[in-house]
Image (spheres, rainbow, N blue to C red):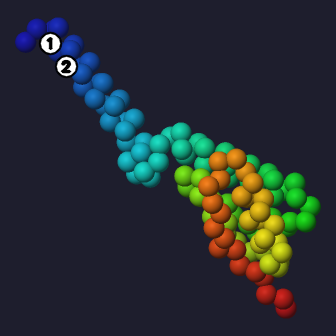
Amino acid sequence: MGSGIWHRIRTYAFAVLILAGTLGCTGLTGRSAGTHIDDSIIESEISIDFLREKNLKSGGINVKSINGVVTLSGVVENEDQEIIAKHIAGKVKGVKSVMSNLQVQKAD
């Protein structure tokens, strides 16, 4: 086999590896790189909006977005805090729905 054929084989093999790597981005999570970035932006914007809200103590709230579906988890002081958090999260661009797994802290 001539060197030209080996060059083509290497080129095709490289192209296949690149394609496999690109497709592999969705393989483990089922989400594309773009969707993952969008979810990260949503999570950041919600967290920032939580910090801006003076009626919300957001230190115990975790935010996770998957394909625009936001899940809030952690602990809040009372039910009003949960309502405020859900409302703020739902107003962020790109959010499709908000699920709350927030636990209301029991009074001592």
Near mark 2 (Cα within 10 A), the count class, few <14, some 14-19 or many ≥20, is few
* Residue that sits furthest to the left in the current view: 1
Kindly state the secondary structure of the residue where label 2 is placed: helix
* Residue that sits furthest to the bottom in the current view: 108
Closest to the observer: 3 or 74?
74
The amino acid sitting under disc 1 is Ile
* Residue that sits furthest to the right in the current view: 54
Residue 47, picture quadrant:
bottom right
Question: Would residue 65 be visible to someone looking at this image?
Answer: no
Question: Would residue 52 be visible to someone looking at this image?
Answer: yes
Residue 45, relative to residue 54: is it above or below?
above
Identify the residue at image location x=26%, y=18%. Answer: 11
Q: Alpha carbon of mark 2 to alpha carbon of mark 1: how far?
A: 6 Å
Pointer 1: what residue? 5
Does residue 82 appear left or right of residue 97 in this picture? right
Closest to the observer: 62 or 95?
95
Kindly state the secondary structure of the residue where label 1 is placed: helix
Marks 2 and 1 in Cβ contact (< 8 Å)? yes
Pointer 2: what residue? 9
Percent of width and height locating residue 94: 65, 48
The amino acid sitting under disc 2 is Ile
Identify the residue at image location x=67%, y=66%. Answer: 72
Residue 20, picture quadrant:
top left
Residue 80, picture quadrant:
bottom right
Identify the residue at image location x=85%, y=91%. Answer: 108
Residue 21, which numbered label? Answer: none
Residue 20, relative to residue 82: is it above or below?
above
Percent of width and height locating residue 89: 73, 58
